[in-house]
């Protein structure tokens, strides 16, 4: 089960996370259904909270998600680099 308090802590401390390719981004906020992330370009992107929950459920079942490509194939095509970066920062992958 995904620890949403840990995700909120990334928002609260304005943590700078990295994609697999080393591109920095931040988790800017959480909505009831989404996660809002932003790279240094100033753009904002949102993907579903349910996607992260699905990824963690797969990981807890023994599935591997080795990178954004795996995330895209196994979980969702929406913002896989940022979603995987969050999973890595929280120690799930």
Image (tube, rainbow, N blue to C red):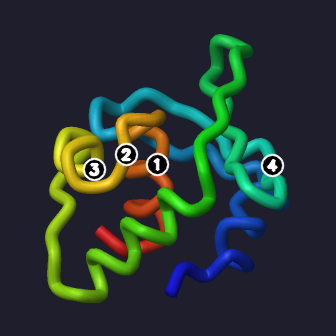
- Report if the CB atoms under discs 4 and 1 are less than 8 Å apart: no
Residues under labels 1 and 2: Cα distance? 9 Å
**Mark 3 lies on residue:** 71
Q: Could you say whether the residue bearing mark 1 is in a helix, strand or loop?
A: helix
Count of numbered circles in the view: 4
How packed is label 1: few (under 14 Cα within 10 Å), some, or many (20 or more)?
Answer: many
* 17 left or right, relative to 4: left
Name the N-terminal-most of marks 1 and 2.
Answer: 2
**Mark 2 lies on residue:** 76
Residues under labels 3 and 4: Cα distance? 21 Å
- Report if the CB atoms under discs 2 and 3 are less than 8 Å apart: yes
Name the N-terminal-most of marks 4 and 1.
Answer: 4
How packed is label 4: few (under 14 Cα within 10 Å), some, or many (20 or more)?
Answer: some
Q: Could you say whether the residue bearing mark 3 is in a helix, strand or loop?
A: helix
Name the N-terminal-most of marks 3 and 1.
Answer: 3
Name the N-terminal-most of marks 2 and 3.
Answer: 3
- Report if the CB atoms under discs 3 and 1 are less than 8 Å apart: yes
Q: Looking at the picture, tell me which residue is in the foreground, 59 or 22.
A: 59
Vertical relation: 18 (above or below) 86? above
Residues under labels 2 and 4: Cα distance? 20 Å
Q: Could you say whether the residue bearing mark 4 is in a helix, strand or loop?
A: strand
**Mark 1 lies on residue:** 83
**Mark 4 lies on residue:** 29
Which quadrant holds residue 30?
A: bottom right
Q: Could you say whether the residue bearing mark 2 is in a helix, strand or loop?
A: loop
Identify the residue shown where x is 16% and y is 75%: 63
Numbered disc in front, either 1 or 2: 2
Numbered disc in front, either 2 or 3: 2
Question: What is the x, y in percent for residue 41?
Answer: 64, 12
């Amino acid at each position: 089960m995904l620890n949403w308090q840990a995700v909120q802590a990334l928002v609260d401390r304005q943590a700078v996370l990295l994609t697999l390719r080393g591109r920095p981004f931040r988790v800017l906020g959480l909505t009831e259904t989404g996660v809002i992330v932003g790279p240094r370009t100033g753009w904002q992107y949102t993907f579903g909270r349910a996607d992260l929950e699905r990824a963690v459920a797969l990981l807890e079942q023994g599935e591997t998600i080795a990178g954004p490509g795996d995330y895209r194939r196994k979980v969702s095509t929406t913002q896989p680099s940022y979603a995987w970066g969050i999973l890595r920062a929280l120690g799930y992958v």
